[in-house]
Image: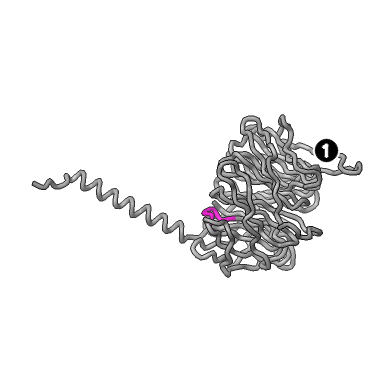
Amino acid sequence: MIRRPSSVVTWLFLITLGLISVNSSMANDAATGKVRFYIGTYNSKASEGIYRSELDLATGKVSEPVLAAPAKNASFLAIHPNKRFLYAVSEEGAGGVAAYAVNQETGDLTLLDQQSSGGAGPCHLVVDKPGTHVLVANYSGGNAAVLPISADGKLEPRSSLVQHEPVIGKNDKKKAPLAHSINLDAAGRFAFVCDAGVDKVFIYRYDATKGALTPNTPPAGLVAPDAAPRHFAWRPDGKQAYAINESELSVTVFDYDAKTGALTAVQTISTVPEGVDRKGFSTAEVVVHPSGKFVYGSNRGYDTIAGFKVDASKGRLTTIGQFAKGSMKVPRNFNIDPTGTFALVEGQDSDNIVSFRIDPESGEFHPTSHSINVGKPVCIKFVR
């Protein structure tokens, strides 16, 4: 005798089928949807401020850029964790950080206020995980500062500032500090400031409640003399970090101690092939693929994106190739979409952004034939 399922079992079975259908539909939507991103620029005849665009996650097509807000040299951007606010450095005069409200439907930006960045030439910033403070690096000022965020997204005067000091380099030459980026670890306990002038990645203890930076012990991670560490990126598991060195055209791999904040340099690898004449070239950005399997760095002058494979156990790098050659000039910045499917590469001197599909197995970039024109693009930030 065959037993028929009870009404309860039948109901559960149908619900399960429904959930599978819904989850499948959501996965398909995610794979074929669009993701918004913002573009920070230097002002030019073809650029008036911060732009917005969308990336099609199925094809790699990029929508025509729309001015989200007029701004003066709003080069680097950071998005608040709640997605309601965006912050931008202003490389004007003594230096500032501007706060914007994000229109959730259109993506347009409304200026809320602006505060001093604490030093000249602000060039990079991040928002902490609680969304209570902006941390900013001031290039010419050679320092880093923290600005509190109020409940309405506006900025308050800085709560902390740390100043780097000059050092004596080769031939007794005095080297001025040049703070080029600031980043936090996953726990938000330590802040890391790449200083291209004094060849150190400074380490600070960060108090998110007080918005305070204090020197750490050990005080810094070290790179080779005159390497000029510029930008910094984490492996997803937080065990390694990668600093790209502007003058040396290399990436330094650091092992990270999350308890002490210590960075230990364990490998440095070139971003250009052996034998290339490096005169006049420099690096700019370093990005870790969301999978953690690949690391990429941009070469200015040589005008490529260098690709590296990450050793799964130790985080060390091996070269996989040079990509995007001939598609743009001076790739100041590039970024990878949150799904890890596409890379968008900016040409600061060619006024364009070019889309590439990333091979998930090899890490290689493949042209999609899609690009847009934007005047002097400097930074891409996806709304994750």
Instruction: Inspect the magenta stretch and tell me whether residue 366 lies in it.
Output: no
- Is residue 268 rendered to the left or right of residue 9? right
Position of residue 179 relative to residue 51, above or below, is above
Q: Position of residue 49 (x, y in %)?
A: 69, 60
Q: Position of residue 23 (x, y in %)?
A: 37, 52
Residue found at the very far bottom of the displayed protein: 369
Q: Does residue 157 appear anywhere in the picture?
A: no
Position of residue 253 relative to residue 353, above or below, is above
Question: Please, what is the three-letter code of the amino acid marked with disc 1?
Answer: Glu
Q: Residue at x 70, y 34 (%)?
A: 204
- Is residue 91 rendered to the left or right of residue 13? right
- Is residue 9 rendered to the left or right of residue 180? left
**Residue 188: quarter of image:** top right
Residue named by callout 1: 165
Residue found at the very far left of the displayed protein: 1
Q: Residue at x 60, y 39 (%)?
A: 239
- Secondary structure, mark 1, is loop
Instruction: Inspect the magenta stretch and tell me whether residue 340 lies in it.
Output: yes
Badge 1 density bin: few <14, some 14–19, many ≥20, Cα 10 Å: few
Position of residue 96 relative to residue 373, above or below, is above
Foreground: 294 or 42?
294
Foreground: 177 or 384?
177
Looking at the rendering, the stretch of residues picked out in magenta corresponds to 336-341
